Amino acid sequence: MWSRTVANTVTYLLLGLGALITLAPCLLSVQTSLKTPQQFAAASPFAPPAPPSTGSYAALTVGEHTLFPPLVITMQVVIVVVLGQLTCSVLAAYAFACLDLPGREWLFRVYLGTLTVPLTATLVPRFVLVSGLGLRDTFAGIVLPTLFGSPYAIFLLRQFFRGIPADLLDAARIDGAGHLRVLRHVVLPLSRPVLATLLIITVVTHWNEFLWPLIITSGERWRVLTVAVSALQSQHNGDWTLVMAATTLATCPLLILFVLFQKHIVRSITITGLK
Amino acid sequence: MGSRGFPVRRTLTGYAFLAPSLIGVGGFLLVPVLVVIVLSLHRWDLVSPARWVGLDNYAGLLDDLAFWQSMLITGMFVAIVVPLQVVLGLLAAVLLDRRLPGSVVFRTIFVLPWISAPLALGVVWRWIFDPSDGAVNRLTGVRIEWLSDPDLALPAVAAVTVWHYTGYVALFFLAGLAGVPAQYHEAARIDGANALQTFRLITLPLFRPTTFFVVVTSLLTTFQTFDLVYAMTRGGPAGATDVIASLIHREGFVEFRMGRAAAMSVVLLLLLITVTVGQQLHFRRRTTYEVS
């Protein structure tokens, strides 16, 4: 019994230490964002803001450094990419899982092979291709490379679709349903868990995406949140209360989403990971 | 099956379903691999016409100190980050797997950094490591130039990278631990094994597929780290944190030497494909006798 108590105490101590290291930087940055530059300069970074000030947030929402346009663009990018990517991936996965096609297995293997292509290595050619289409510094340029489905999503969906009993699909077809109807009324309703998983992964990935929007856009017109925060940081280096408010604003929407759908997201990550 | 129609029509329908993804996978994954190879054989600044130079860009890389330094730094960065991430992630998973009250809260907290944009977190850490206003130096009372000292910058960025991904790694190990049947542990305990022996002799061997997945993912992501480096140091001081992704970005999109950037990309591509294949062979050899 005594050794169990010791083990439990050690477990809690280590978990607590881990939680402290994980949270402290985030909490300190939120705390700093609520100070005025004078308060920040005068007191220790660990002292709570007295009184809390929302000056930085005012400047970042309605004031001169407004992050509102980047927020809107980020949301548009995420919505367009999520809809495009999921639709195209569902169509492809249905063909791979449920349709009898010549060259199907061969093509699927090619798709799988592209999973090993590191995105950083294709940055330069993707830039050249999108520029060649005349889409540099446009909304289309930001979303185009990821709009038409991802091999990862296709792979995951195909695995799931193959688990759906063929009798169910045949029954629907005998009743005269075309492929799109079968897909919409039989396959998709059964696939809600895997669709939710992909939805979450895609939203997180594209909300946080930085390198591609950084290189394909220039100037303020099509700045997404991550690029805007980075620009703000270089322009106001040292103005930490403002910069910390910006990082808080940029991460908050996803964190709220995460806490709300915590259970689902944790399950999603592990499902997609263990394939 | 009668309503399926003619094979030609069936084939056309099928490929109609595949068409959009063929644009995506073909146009933005396969074609770029070919384009990057072709580009690496040219000199091009995006303005004047591209000029064929054969293998000059690769020959140039051999003499380029910045490139070799970047390769070395990337190697060191990976060598610090991946083992730490895997060991700490495993430790966190084992602790969470004891399922004491409150474990779910800890699990949620550990994943928070992974949900947040690395760029934003990098900016937060840039402040925390700031020599005069930063939390670390204010806490210790010593003025240390964390991010502008060439000896400290790489370990600092590596530590933040570990901080960022460990919770994510822990989730995978946690799922793997849940897959180890409880009766194995029971049997080992009855045979008189202590907790450490059970872990080493039962859990770890059954864990190989999870470990494989985690190590490969961790290697692939760490080799491509960009956002955190960009936010914290921009590759500085004096190239001390100039990992390969940071160098490719600067060559291509700051200096506009597309051919050189493409040659570096090809090297990265070959390196990462070797890592994936090598890992696969290694783990396949060691898991042949495993029950799966």
Image (cartoon, coloured by chain):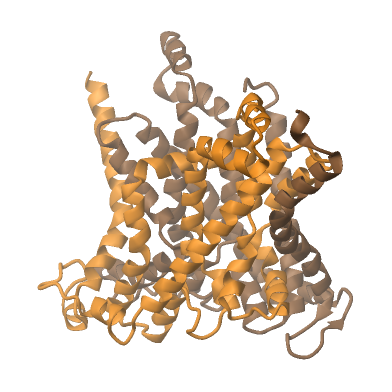
Chain colours: A orange, B brown
Q: Quadrant of the N terminus of chain B?
A: top right
Q: Is residue A221 above or below residue B229?
A: below
Q: Is residue A24 above or below residue B129?
A: above
| Residue at position x 79%, y 69% in the image | B35
Which residue is at the far front? Answer: A176
Residue B152 seen in this snapshot:
no
A10 lies left or right of B19:
left
Q: Nearer the viewer, residue A249 or B18?
A: B18
Residue B157 at x, y = what percent? Answer: 47, 64
B265 lies left or right of A9:
right
Residue B66 at x, y = what percent? Answer: 67, 75
Residue B108, quarter of the rendered image: top left
| Residue at position x 28%, y 30% in the image | B100
Residue A46, quarter of the rendered image: bottom left
Q: Nearer the viewer, residue B230 or A260?
A: A260
Q: Is residue B253 above or below residue A166?
A: below
| Residue at position x 29%, y 78% in the image | A61
Number of marks in the rendered image: 0
Q: Nearer the viewer, residue B64 or A243?
A: A243
Residue B232 at x, y = what percent? Answer: 45, 71
A169 lies left or right of B182:
right
Which residue is at the far top? Answer: B190
Residue A134, quarter of the rendered image: bottom right
Residue B199 seen in this snapshot:
yes
Residue B191 at x, y = what percent? Answer: 45, 9
| Residue at position x 73%, y 49% in the image | A111
Q: Quadrant of the C terminus of chain B?
A: top right
